Every structure is written in C-alpha cells, then in structure tokens.
Amino acid sequence: MNQFKFLTSNQQKASDFLSYGVIAQPFNKEITEIKHEDVRMVALHKARDTGLNNIVVEDTALYIENSNIFGTDIKHAYDNMLAHRLYNNEKACWMVCLCAKSNNKFILSVGKVDGQIFHPHSKHGYHFEKFFAINHKGNITHFNDLPGLIKKELNPRLYAIENLVCALKYGDYSKVQVINEADVLNWDGAYQIEAGKGTSLLTGIAKRNKR
C-alpha cells in the first residue's frame, strides 16, 4: 500500500510519511477515544471506529512514574502539569502508536523513548515536548532543544512510521503487531470526553453496537 488516508488535522504529520515513500492524505472525522491506559488499545479502537479501510490513525501517551494519570490522558493533563510543574524529575516514557486498517486486519506500530519530566519547561516545542527531557551528553535536555539529528533519531513517532511503512509497503511485519478484525471485541467501557476547550477530562460510559 503506497497511499492511504491518515486521520489528522496536522498537515506536517501527514507529510512525514513522504520521507518513507508513502502518500498519506489527511482527513478529519470526530472519534471519541476509549479510556484505557494502553496506547495500543486506544489506537486500535480509534481505527476500528472510523469504519473505514486503508486508513491510519495515531495516538500518543506519556507514561510517568508515581503519577495518578493514565499515560493516554496526557493531552487532558498537560495544562495542569505545565502550570503547576507537576512530577518534576520523575521518569517518563513517551510512546506513539500508529494503527493501520487494511482489508480485515489492523496493523499496530509502536515507537517509544525513555526520559523524565523536567521543569521549568522549555519555551520551545509542542505540547509535552516542553517538559519531557532526556540525558544528552550528561545534561538533562528538553526534547525539543536537542540537536536536529538527535531529535529525529530518537523521535518515537518516526520510528513507528518507519516500521509501519515496512509492513504496508514491503510486507515486513517483524516489528509490528497484526490483529484480525474479527478478534477485536466491542468496547463496553469508559470513553474520553472533553466538555470544552480547556476543561478537565470527564468520563463517559457508552456501548457500541457491533459493526
């Protein structure tokens, strides 16, 4: 598969696939994400709930030791962490999961990088890259302040893209997980619901009918 649709409103994210010889056409569709601590589960059900084929979705998590939040809830906890400098110096793992739906199969590709939370945050970067840091040459350095080549080499999203492309384009499934559509159970649990911009995470319970 050399071309597919990618669920995103970020054109830059879609264009990243071009470096690997694949065209990703961005599209928008409102999907309510399940509430689960495993980023792979969130991505899997997001892909399923599009109801579409030949698509890729993405989900990101930041797992923080000694915290009281799910790693997949980071987008909801971000503002509070930034404002109150929460979890300073705690170990953290940044994970990105891409999930492709091709015919009757889901293909999951995960990239991750270990680091820590480090305040005060950087003035540069996007979202939690401002306070996620790694040890670079003996110095705790915010991810977005790393040299360009190092940042590209460690970027978990690019790692996930590379392995997904190897599966979709070249048939190399050695670094991805393949799940048959028939094996994906209906979700009967909590969903992430945002009541409005800047509000905290609410929990919704919903049941989906089998497609």
Image (cartoon, rainbow, N blue to C red):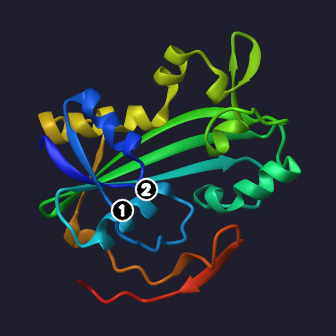
Q: Amino acid at mark 2?
A: Arg
Residue 175, visible in the rendered structure: no
Residue 41 as seen in the image, left or right of residue 70: left
Residue 87, visible in the rendered structure: yes
- Name the quadrant containing residue 19: top left
| Percent x, y of residue 130 | 70, 37
- According to the image, label 2 marks what residue? 40
Residue 23 as seen in the image, left or right of residue 74: left
Q: CA distance from mark 1 to mark 2?
A: 6 Å
| Percent x, y of residue 52 | 21, 68
Q: Quadrant of the C terminus?
A: bottom left
Q: Is residue 143 above or below residue 161?
A: above
| Residue in front for this viewpoint, 88 or 22 | 22
Q: Is residue 194 above or below residue 122?
A: below
Q: Amino acid at mark 1?
A: Leu
Q: Residue at x 35, y 80 (%)?
A: 186
Disc 1 packing (10 Å; few <14; some 14–19; many ≥20)? many
Q: Which disc number belongs to residue 65?
A: none
Q: Residue at x 71, y 71 (%)?
A: 200
Q: Is residue 118 above or below residue 199?
A: above
- According to the image, label 1 marks what residue? 44
Residue at the top extreme, as displayed:
137
| Percent x, y of residue 4 | 19, 50
Cβ–Cβ under 8 Å for marks 1 and 2:
yes
| Residue in front for this viewpoint, 187 or 100 | 100
Q: Secondary structure at mark 1?
A: helix
Q: Secondary structure at mark 2?
A: helix
Q: Quadrant of the N terminus?
A: top left
| Percent x, y of residue 22 | 20, 36
